[in-house]
Amino acid sequence: MSNAPPAASSSCHDHEEDDDEGDTFEPSAPDPGNCEVANANHYGQFTWTVALPAAPADKDSLADISKIRQFSDVFEVGGFEWKLEMYPYGDSQSDKTLSVFLCAVDRKQLPGWSQTAHYQIAVVNKDPSKTSTHTGYDIFRGKRDSAWGWSKLINLSKLHDVTQGWADEDGKITLQATVHVVKHEYMAVNRTYRKSLCGLYYERVLQSYFEPFLKDELQRLDKLCGNNVLHKGFSDFWAALSDAKKRALLQITMDEVLLNVKARLFSRDQPATYLAADVIFKAAHDCTSGLSTEASQRSLVGCTSLAMVGGGDGTVLRLERLTPEASGGLSSLVSRHDCVDQLTAGTLKASSRVMLRTHKGVMRMSNSANFVDVFRAQVSDALDNVRALVKHLKPQSCDGACLEAMGRQMLAVFAMCGMYITNVHPAYHEKLALQLQEDLIREEEEKNLKAEAKKAKQAEKRKKQQALKAEKKAQEEKEKKEAEEAENKKKEAEAAKRKAQEEEQARKKAEARRKAQEEAEKQRKLELEAEERRLREEAEVKARAEREQMQQQQAQQQQQQAQQQQQQAQQ
């Protein structure tokens, strides 16, 4: 069966009772050859072979074609009853497509019940590579959300075409439902269902969840390892610890590890995160449950060998970083991982090794090297392995083995991350705080000694300064007195000079006033003489005018007399 991505996301469907309006086709007694349920705990599969009903011939019935539906038999998975609801000609939300929904039968449940489940609905094709599989993850709640599925599952034109391989010669199709009831967030899924999820989500698990987490951890560690001062400080701290103290720091409970996995990776709304958490949980379950003394599981991911060996003191998770010669190339490893599982430890050339022993729910790390260097190397290896798996592993070849191996490595990384955050980092900072406190006390004592020496030196200095100050003050007073006398003499000389200048200025001003007065007097005399000349000239002009006037009058009188005499003479 091919695990092709779903054509549309799952949607809630309002489930109606069997006596509602519409044509409902209920199958008769199930045929053992056509209907089977494989139920194991919380996982089950149900196969339903059903004949597609003929479309109504009359126009009135065609208007209600979306109400035609069929129900499968009820099957039980995880203590809950389920059945498939099919609309052979599509429901009210689809057009010319097959609609199929998974219905939760709540007749045995109390009112208000709800249950979360992973589920798959597949339309089986004669060619397994063409089988269409759709995966959902939803919460079923009583009658309100009792049915989840897809309105547009597959086009009807393809479905009814016998040459396409969906329907057989009798017009029957085969639907397969896979249900995995989620009882709690860390419940390991069925191996068959895990394989199906791997085909759908392995790339998303690697690229969207494992890779970002590893990048964040690597970036945080690079800040410590990339700074020479900080790295040397941690190296000195780690080297100074006793073996007993290191053992106490390099341990963490499995519950703490899984809580960190939940916080960093798991989300109930994303099915891919369920797979991401599940492969790590499975590794944790294998480590916690333990294996027989002779039993051993080994696999290769990239250039890292992962092995789990059981013993009387718990299960050991062993990580070995391999050289390229020992690994034989990544592309061949991911394509032949079944053969790689048969390798023994003697054939592997390991350049580094980390061992995590789990006993009574507690993981302990055995490594005396610098913890941050070992931690960073494992994070870097895991990141390289994630990228290599994404590059080389194909969906058709992903059966879950590589993801399970990657889950063991991620479990080791999460364990070391928890050790670092919970134990090592606080202990390191506590050591830094104690060292800082000791440094502060030592600095304070040195500061007090220096302060006392400084006080004595300052007292001697003040004494010398006071003597110098007194001598300087006397010298300054003497110089001040001499300066005052010189200043007084200078002022007296300046006063005498100013007085002489003032007298000279007064004399010059008096001389200037005298000259101005003489000039004014001389000017006034000239003006008087000019005025007299003007008056004389005016008097002369006036006298001359009067003489001329008198002469004219005399001439007129003589003329008048002459005229009178002439007149008399004429008479």
Image (spheres, rainbow, N blue to C red):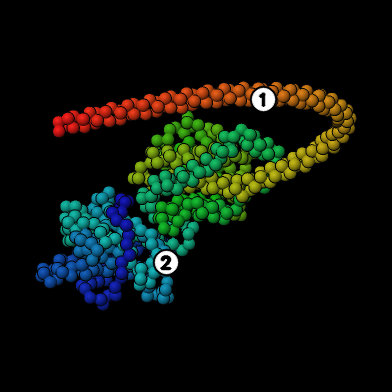
Q: Quadrant of residue 177?
A: bottom left
Q: Quadrant of residue 474?
A: top right
The answer to whether one can see residue 364 in this image is no
Given residues 332 and 444, the one toward you in this image is: 444
For residue 348, above or below residue 18: above
**x 39%, y 69%: residue:** 141
Badge 2 or badge 1: first in the primary sequence: 2
**x 30%, y 30%: residue:** 553
| Circle 2 SS class | strand
Indicate the quadrant containing the C terminus: top left, top right, bottom left or bottom right: top left
Query: Which amino acid type corresponds to the residue marked 1 in the rendered image?
Result: Ala
Picture disc at residue 115: 2
The reply, left or right, for residue 320 in relation to residue 93 is: right
Tell me the distance, in whole angstroms, between the alpha carbons under discs 2 and 1. Answer: 127 Å
Q: Dot 1: within a 10 Å radius of its alpha carbon, few (fewer than 14), some, or many (20 or more) residues? A: few
- Of labels 2 and 1, the one closer to you: 1
**x 26%, y 65%: residue:** 86
List x then y, in percent, for residue 292: 55, 50
Given residues 449 and 40, the one toward you in this image is: 449
Disc 1 marks which residue?
510
List x then y, in percent, for residue 372: 60, 39
Picture disc at residue 249: none
Number of labels in the image equals 2
**x 38%, y 72%: residue:** 142
